[in-house]
Amino acid sequence: MVTLKDVAKRAGVSIATVSRVMSNSDAVADKSRQRVLEAIEELGYYSNELARGLRQEKINAVAVILPDISNPFFADMLRGIDDVLSTCSYFILFNNTDNNIQVEKKCLENMRSMALSGALVYCCHKSLDELAPSLPANSDTVFLSGGNGLQTDNTHFLSFSRKDTAYVAAKHLYDLKRQKLLLMLSSFRQDDNAFAEGIKKAAEETGGSYCIATSADNERDASRVFGQAYATELPDGVITESDIQAMGILNWLKTNGINVPGDISMAGLGNTSLAQCTEPALTSAAPSGYQIGMAGANHLLNLIQKDSKNFLRDTKTLEQMLLPNIIVRGTSK
């Protein structure tokens, strides 16, 4: 069995230098790093992350807790997280919770017993206080969805505004002379009404009007709910929380001979990969799930490993990534 000592001997460096390379530390000269990496490849060395983690009281693993991986928004978020963490030799322990707070609590408690390096969590509850007793005391947790009332030393929140995201989408449609918007929310979300506040702000500024409907996060229910709302509300603009809902509504409009964007304009709040697959392509408000995942993973790395080599380090760059903006596509031209 190849050991660190064997790698150090082949590379002509100390065991401490090999350990620093394995930890992705910046405190290693480039030439020494290259020799160590070549020795690792030549000898076929694989580190025992669990054993190393037990010695250091932490393993290079991060818990990722998301509500619904079947939703493209969260699938994109997971991809963004992995694209960052994998470059720094961290692996992911993923948990799908179906937005069940009891499952979220259990996941966090398991993380505490496994001595993971940190956690990235997206919750959709009105308050996160119930999670506080389950949070690990000696690891950092970054909430990707913001938070309400939860205060601990190791709890952190991404700084972005769902209200502002909805606002830029609504303002875009009002600027296109759409007068009455329908905001289609997802029934799985239990937290604050930030999206509704965003569309309300845009309506007050422009003199437009709006109504709100809620559907399950699938095409069939979104189509059904929209058909009922359209019969009574007659909106000329639609904003959907998820791109899956948008697909259902676009299918309903096409079936009923209503032209997009001629008769009705649309925008989504997800900006997932699905947005460019609809016909016409869906105008989207950013940040996307992928951007949120990348920013959250970078933020966590900045907390747990100061010398890691990740994509984006400085706070200003992360904040810029999460600023709301509109990506205009075929549904609102």
Image: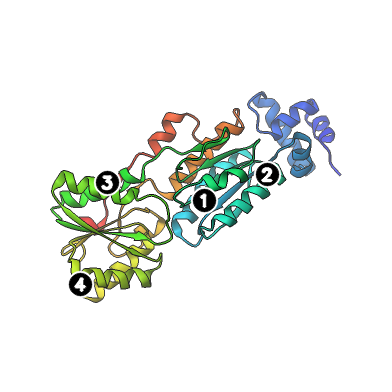
Q: Which residue is mark 2?
A: 112
- Mark 1 Cα shell of 10 Å, populated few (<14), some (14-19), many (≥20): some
Could you tell whether 80 is left or right of 117 in the image? Answer: left
Callout 3 amino acid:
Tyr
- Mark 3 Cα shell of 10 Å, populated few (<14), some (14-19), many (≥20): many
SS at mark 3 in the image: helix
Marker disc for residue 111: none
Callout 4 amino acid:
Ala
Residue occupying the point 66% across, 23% down: 27
Of circles 3 and 2, which is in front? 2
Q: Which residue is mark 3?
A: 167
Q: CA distance from mark 3 to mark 2?
A: 38 Å
Q: Give the x, y percent position of residue 123.
A: 49, 50
Residue 119 vs residue 81, the one in the foreground: 119
Q: Which residue is mark 4?
A: 231
Q: Earlier in the sequence, mark 2 or mark 1?
A: 1
The vertical placement of 245 against 2, above or below, is below
Q: Are marks 3 and 2 in contact (CB under 8 Å)?
A: no
SS at mark 4 in the image: helix
Residue 287 vs residue 309, the one in the foreground: 287
The vertical placement of 8 against 110, above or below, is above
Callout 1 amino acid:
Arg
Q: Earlier in the sequence, mark 4 or mark 1?
A: 1
Q: Earlier in the sequence, mark 4 or mark 2?
A: 2
